[in-house]
Image (cartoon, helix red, strand yellow):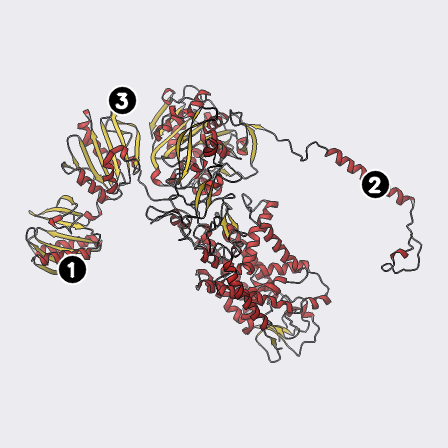
Amino acid sequence: MCKSDPPFNGELMPSKSKNVELYDRRKFLNRVAYACAGALGVSAITYMARSGEPVYRRPEKILTIPKFSVDAGAVYPRMAIVHGKDADRMVKAALEKLGGVEKFIKPGDRVLIKPNVAWDRAPEQAANTNPHVVAAIIKAIMPARPASVTVTDVSLNDPYRCFARSGIESAAKHAGAMVFIPGDGDFRTADLKGELLTQWPVTRAVFEADKIINAPVVKHHSLSGATLSQKNWYGMLGGRRNQLHQDIHTSIADLAQAFRPTLTVMDATRVLMRNGPNGGSLSDVSVFDTIIAGTDEVAIDAYSMGLLGLDPAGQTFMQMAEKRGLGVTRWKDIHHAEFTV
Amino acid sequence: MKADLNGPFSLKTIRRVWSVFFVAMFLFLLWTADFRHLKGYEASLFLKIDPLVYLSGLLTGWTVYKGLALALLIVIPTLFLGRFFCSWICPYGILHHWAGKILLKRSAAEYHEENAYRPIYRIKYYILTALIVLSAFGASQIGLFDPIATVSRALIISLFPAFDQLAGVIYRKQPVYLGGALIGFLFIGFILANRYVNRFWCRTLCPLGALLGIISSVSIMRIRRDVDKCNDCFKCLKGCQGACDPHTELRASECLACMNCIYDCPEAALAYGLPGPRSSAHKPVDANRRRIIETALASLVLYPMLKSSLGSGNTALAEVIRPPGSLPEPDFLRRCIKCSMCMKVCPTNVLQPALLEAGVEGLWTPILVNKIGYCEHHCTLCGHVCPTGAIMPMTVKDKVGTPEKKAVKLGTAFYDRGRCLPWAMNVECIVCEEVCPTSPKAIWFETKEIKNRDGSVKKLKIPYLDPKLCIGCGICENKCPVRDTAAIRVTSVGETRSTTNRMILEK
Amino acid sequence: MTARLGLYLLLPVFALAVYIHGHRYSPSLFEYKGQHAPALAGFLPASLDGLSRDGHPRVFTKDNLFELVDGHAEFFISAGFKQSAVAGYRVAGDEAGMPVINIEVYDMGAPENAFGVMAEEGAQAEAFDVGFMGVKTGESAMFIKGPYYVKLTAFAKGADKLSACARAVDKAMTGVAATLPQLDRLPDKGSTGKNYIRKDYLGMDFFAGVFEKKYNRGGEEFSAFVMTPKEGAKTLVNKALAFYKQSGAKTVAVESGEMRGWDIADKYEGSMTLTVAVHDVIGVKGLADGNARVAFLMETLAIVQK
């Protein structure tokens, strides 16, 4: 409480204010306490934030790609080539030949299907996997009672348009699978442990799956000759993947080495013969009505190259993959089956 | 007059319900402006019913283009009912009304000063004059001041992306826009102006309001004050939105038909309707005739000045790559009202509001910036949402072209051989060839043998461009690994919409 | 009061109008599947009558057709060539053997073009009933079906398999109509053969691109023809009438019901009657009786109108 002085005209003559500050002990201690608390707080913050670096960076966990491959056993063929017109029957028959879907998918598995949905094209233009084939794969694995089936890809054109116009989004949903379109925040850094590709952003769908089925389509590609099952893993990467073309063959081999799927189902129902990988004109497409399923991606790619009129011996990434032990280019040498349904 | 009580059937309540409905519909239609949702929705509906767009379109193009005739649905009722559009339908006006309610808190006494008419409110008539005169000579700049175009632009370019930055719900990939901050500042500025003057934009600046005000001069349904019942308490000014002086001789051209005064009057002296025997007189449109003539003359002089400055209308400019289906540049500048609907609907975010790339007249008109996106080969959405026909709608088949009819070209791509990895640095690439969407591809390559620095020999695929096939979509520029300035860039030359901006001799 | 209620009710009306308008749209706004291209490789099955296909069919377009047929590519391209698929067939089980039959399927774009190609290539061969029309020699067979021209060539032991293979390919061409739209205009009853005359039909230079059907009805032999002139049916008829009149032949206009025709008494070919049907000129000759000719033309018009 201050002694009351006569009221003063504080605005005109502030110096004439005779108000005195009355200090008592409580106030004093209060103030000291606040000051000490402030000093402590600021010192604590300073201590915790001390750093030799100007900007704080959360240590990022580098992940590794899990192993997804399964061996059905030597008695079954490692590759099944099926000709026919009904995708459902063809895929089912192919999986049966390889040992039955139960050999590959166990109940409770979270299954990820990776078709080629890179381009904003209609199904007839054969720039993406045939939606009927994708639906057939989903329907064929459902009896094995997976916990979930997700279809995903990292598209090159606008993803919503790619999934919609390719027919794969609606085919997947009708067959009972979920569709996952990654956004900017859905990538995790992983070490691909390749000769050229080390740490790259990879879509988080890979780390949330127990089994992966690769579902590529056979297409011509100017740079690598063809884009088949090994190159399909491109669609798991984010970031600056348009730099991989500078050493495309090593990149493909590294990708094939890092991502080993449970199963590969190659769509050769419609094949993009020219102007790949995105085509555009229907006259670039040839109908072959074939599906190739198997566990040896190199062999499947070698067979598919024949459809395009290419020789596997002439493609560097095929030789590289074989040298690394990822598969065989002479597909006729492995145990395979070819039939029509 | 029977006392009109404030209840569910009072004009005030109906006006409130309408205002919520139309703001919701406006936001809904903006939401449909997207590849996944568009279907057949009239995403630009509000722009099509806008009488100012109708008038300007009539003057610049001598046409009432398609849906713009819908403006009659507003003009004709306004002739009879007054400026109901401003408080019942206009989303910008309604937003200002809500902003004013939240921001402006004055005591009852202060409202009387606040909502009295001020001479400064004449400015909107001068703005309207300037815009009309310019339009009459073919230089349409109404997009700068038209309220619907302004609110569309503000929401699309700054508000929605900003909201998505925080909540991440509107877009899959958050778009970025050139100069979005400026448009955002202007929007916030005008909304905050309501803190100082209620409905600042509507009263002072809005040329559409001025136009509707002039049209309302002959309206027979107005706010009428019974001079006998009125006791001069000034309570009617409390909620008055238009500052139209309901307490004296009401200015019908300023009245925004908010209906608040009717229910604020304790004597039930105010009503909306036909004149009664004791209804007060009305004041005519207040605009200084001399000033109008001065403004008109100034605009007349401004017009040739605009046309003499270097802009896309008189020169072929490399950076002015317009959306597919655009009219030739001089006509485009006449029709574009800078509403940004095309930018909202564009799936790759390539359409950007130009700043000065197209000259002064081209401010905020859409251009393609291929660094940010590219024109999707099978997409024609921009033409379908453009309300004035600056971008004409076309089918995907027409855009892509058939062997009989050529594809639509936006420009041509050019290699910067000093930056291209195969050309300049002996490094394998050809991403551009891979992503080129035409069939056959406009980018082709030659396999050459080159010598490395250490003398070893390497086979390299080196890209070339075929200008006859290139459609200027820009995906090559967008996907080129040389990120900062791409090694292949698209410029506007070769665009099919222009007869002069060509370089290759063709039939 | 009702006016105020009406103001409220207007709102759902607006909402409904916007919604209904939103759901009415044409898919061509968003979709374009590209022009229809035939599945040529599907016409060359993996196995055919005891032979199995050697590898996969090779597809050729305008750009690389010369790799298949050398200089002859010009002929095909100017005749409307779009695409072709080629495959060789060897004896089944004989993996290392050489192909014994080579099959080439050409998509000529339109049935008339295929017809034209076969008329040139198969001029010297005997008729062979496969597809829409076919011919064969000792070592080759060719036929047309729809817009496709199919050529089979036999090597070594393949000659006896030619017919069977041709029929098998014909069967594999499902969904392809074995007709020519112009020839469909002429009735089938009593038809004994069909022919395509590229130019100078009846010795007249204005009769070109003519499809002819020969008939034998009740012992009487006659023929009918149809053509779709580029300059328009009416113009062609006027040209023909002017020519005949000038050379002294008698021309008489005839009418019967809806049909308007012209009788022409050609010195060398006998009497014929012409009529116009939409874009085509149809004629009949070889029947002496004018009324019979008119009746025949009425028959053809009935087909057109169906």
Q: Residue C198 carries which label?
A: none
Q: Mark 3 points at which residue?
A: C93
Height in image: C120 above or below B80? above
Q: Which amino acid type corresponds to the residue marked 1 in the rendered image?
A: Arg
A212 lies left or right of A221: right
Q: Which amino acid type corresponds to the residue marked 2 in the rendered image?
A: Ala
Residue B226 image offset from top left, x and y in percent: 64, 77
Q: Name the residue under label 1.
A: C260
The mark closer to the camera, 2 or 3, is 2
Residue A140 image offset from top left, x and y in percent: 43, 32
**Chain of the residue under label 2:** A
**Image quarter hosting the N terminus of chain B:** bottom right
* First in residue order: circle 1 vs circle 3: 3
Height in image: B59 above or below B269? above
**Chain of the residue under label 3:** C
Residue C225 image offset from top left, x and y in percent: 15, 49
SS state under label 3: loop
Q: Name the residue under label 2.
A: A35
Q: Residues within 10 Å of mark 1 (few under 14, many from 20)?
A: some
Q: CA–CA distance between discs 1 and 2?
A: 115 Å
Q: Residues within 10 Å of mark 2 (few under 14, many from 20)?
A: few
Which is more toward the observer, B191 or C160? B191
